[in-house]
Image: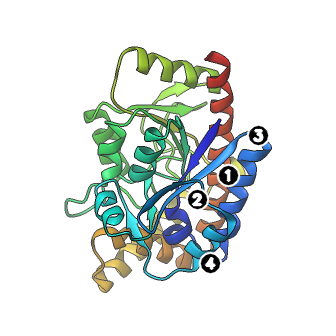
């Protein structure tokens, strides 16, 4: 069975050549677990469910690649443009191709300050996909994001934990339902389908302990990155990649290393969930 992987991490999440190495490493993890990786992007207007190594390399070095959420997909495809896909667009395209499990780094959510809410949350409420992540991105307002997930009735479970992870940190202080095994997650997904619920099953997988970053340090780096953002006047879709880049700068690369580790951890868990689904079916 295939495991879906997003492509925004290649174009906007990590610097070159870390982005290529990480993308290829994630695909290799899927293969080692007996699966088929499906890195998703839009190439010249065509939704591509699975990229070649040369396409990943090209996407990683291209300038001005569009970052497409599900809202932008019709425009990008009609104009025959090339775009990487965010969580929302990847989840939708994976679901349409019958790929039930998608591994990513972190989901978008509610940004602090003026009203800014990611499309990811709304897509999670209407697309029946298992999405494995390390929680909302650290730059977000975690409590507001958790509240929005509840309001949108997105079923969220923390893997072998009792609270929502905070991307670079294993805990956030925000309670979450618990799932202790891939088999239990697969059973929850099957129950969702029996109930004909429209949304995703969001699996919150804490970052491996050895790669967890100090919460106070992350807060300082986030504050510095937000100050940079205000000074630069960046808005809209440019906010998240700008903040991630500035956090990498202020942390001297620590956030990049942790990001890579949590991505690999999420893909491994996604592969185990796929195996559990196959057994149940």
> Is residue 230 found left or right of 268 in the rendered image?
left
Q: Compared to 200, does 65 lie above or below?
A: below
> Is residue 214 found left or right of 136 in the rendered image?
right
Residue 213 place in picture, x, y as percent: 60, 59
Q: Contact, CB < 8 Å: mark 3 with mark 1?
A: no
Residue bearing the label numbered 2:
214
Residue furthest right as drawn: 32
Residue 35 place in picture, x, y as percent: 71, 40
Residue furthest left as drawn: 115
Q: How crowded is the residue under tag 3: few (<14 C-alpha within 10 Å), some, or many (20+)? A: some
Visible residue check, residue 251? no
Label 2 – label 1 distance at C-alpha: 20 Å
Q: Who is closer to the viewer here, 237 or 79?
A: 79
| Of callouts 2 and 1, the N-terminal one | 2
Q: Contact, CB < 8 Å: mark 4 with mark 2?
A: no
Image quarter hosting the C terminus: top right
Foreground mark, 2 or 1, reads 1
- The numbered dot on residue 33 is 3
Q: Which residue is depicted at the point 45% across and 69% down?
A: 44
Residue bearing the label numbered 4:
16
Residue 57 place in picture, x, y as percent: 64, 73
Q: Who is closer to the viewer here, 177 or 8?
A: 8
Label 3 – label 1 distance at C-alpha: 12 Å
- The numbered dot on residue 264 is 1
Q: How crowded is the residue under tag 2: few (<14 C-alpha within 10 Å), some, or many (20+)? A: few
Label 4 – label 2 distance at C-alpha: 26 Å
Q: Compared to 105, does 204 lie above or below?
A: above
């Amino acid at each position: 069975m295939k495991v879906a992987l997003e492509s925004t991490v290649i174009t906007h999440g990590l610097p070159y050549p870390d982005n290529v190495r990480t993308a290829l490493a994630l695909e290799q993890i899927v293969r080692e677990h007996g699966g088929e990786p499906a890195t998703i992007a839009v190439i010249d207007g065509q939704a591509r469910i699975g990229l070649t190594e040369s396409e990943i390399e090209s996407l990683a070095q291209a300038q001005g690649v569009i970052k497409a959420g599900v809202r932008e997909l019709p425009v990008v495809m009609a104009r025959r443009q090339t775009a990487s896909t965010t969580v929302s667009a990847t989840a939708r395209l994976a679901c349409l191709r019958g790929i039930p499990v998608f591994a990513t780094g972190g989901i978008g959510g509610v940004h602090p300050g003026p009203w800014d809410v990611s499309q990811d949350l709304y897509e999670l409420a209407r697309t029946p996909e298992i999405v494995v992540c390390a929680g909302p991105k650290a730059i977000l307002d975690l409590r507001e994001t958790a509240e929005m997930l509840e309001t949108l009735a997105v079923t969220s479970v923390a893997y072998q934990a009792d609270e929502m992870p905070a991307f670079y940190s294993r805990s956030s202080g925000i309670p979450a339902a618990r799932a202790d095994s891939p088999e239990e997650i697969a059973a929850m997904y099957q129950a969702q389908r029996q109930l004909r619920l429209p949304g995703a099953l969001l699996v919150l997988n804490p970052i491996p302990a050895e790669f967890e970053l100090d919460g106070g340090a992350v807060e300082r780096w986030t504050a510095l990155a937000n100050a940079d953002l205000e000074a630069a006047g960046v808005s809209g879709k440019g906010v998240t990649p700008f903040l991630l880049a500035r956090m990498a700068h202020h942390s001297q690369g620590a956030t990049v290393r942790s990001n890579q580790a949590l991505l690999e951890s999420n893909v491994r868990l996604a592969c185990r969930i796929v195996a559990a689904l196959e057994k149940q079916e």
